Amino acid sequence: MFSCVFCEEEWVYTTNLCENCRRLKHLKKIYRERFNETLERVLVRNIAGMDNKIEDLKLKNGIEQTDESYLKKPNTRSKKSPFNDNNILEKN
């Protein structure tokens, strides 16, 4: 019993590739360079695609920020702590 040499997830008995990987290999042989181009175009995100997605989300949510203030870390905690005063545990 061996693991598939391509996906390394499935166990095979008599071949080097599992059924799914064998199908991918077959498609690669048929379509050659077109197979690679399709994978790159469909599965791999490029910078332009990521920027386009950000712009779409801004428009969808009604955000029209020209600056990059949305990238700054929000100030969510108060700088004043209730535990640094002398009256921490006042009892009534």
Image (cartoon, rainbow, N blue to C red):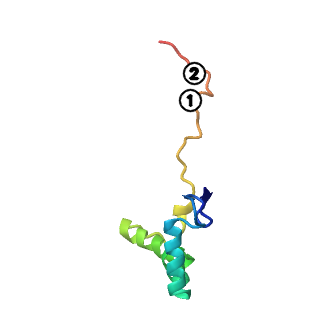
Q: Toward the viewer: 23 or 13?
A: 13
Q: Amino acid at mark 1?
A: Pro
Q: Report crowding for label 2: few under 14, some 14 to 19, many 20 or more residues within 10 A (C-alpha).
A: few
Between marks 2 and 1, how big is the CA–CA gap? 7 Å
Residue 51 visible here: no
Q: Toward the viewer: 27 or 77?
A: 27
Residue 3 visible here: yes
Q: Amino acid at mark 2?
A: Ile
* Circle 1 SS class: loop
Disc 1: which residue:
82
Q: Toward the viewer: 39 or 28?
A: 28
Against 21, is 74 above or below? above
Contact between marks 2 and 1 (CB within 8 A): the answer is yes
Disc 2: which residue:
88
Q: Position of residue 21 (x, y in %)?
A: 53, 69
Mark found first going from the N terminus, 2 or 1 = 1
Q: Position of residue 80 (x, y in %)?
A: 58, 36
| Residue at screen point 59% across, 40% down | 79
* Circle 2 SS class: loop
Q: Quadrant of the N terminus?
A: bottom right
Q: Position of residue 23 (x, y in %)?
A: 49, 73
Q: Report crowding for label 1: few under 14, some 14 to 19, many 20 or more residues within 10 A (C-alpha).
A: few
Q: Quadrant of residue 62?
A: bottom left
Against 20, is 89 above or below? above
Q: Toward the viewer: 9 or 84?
A: 9
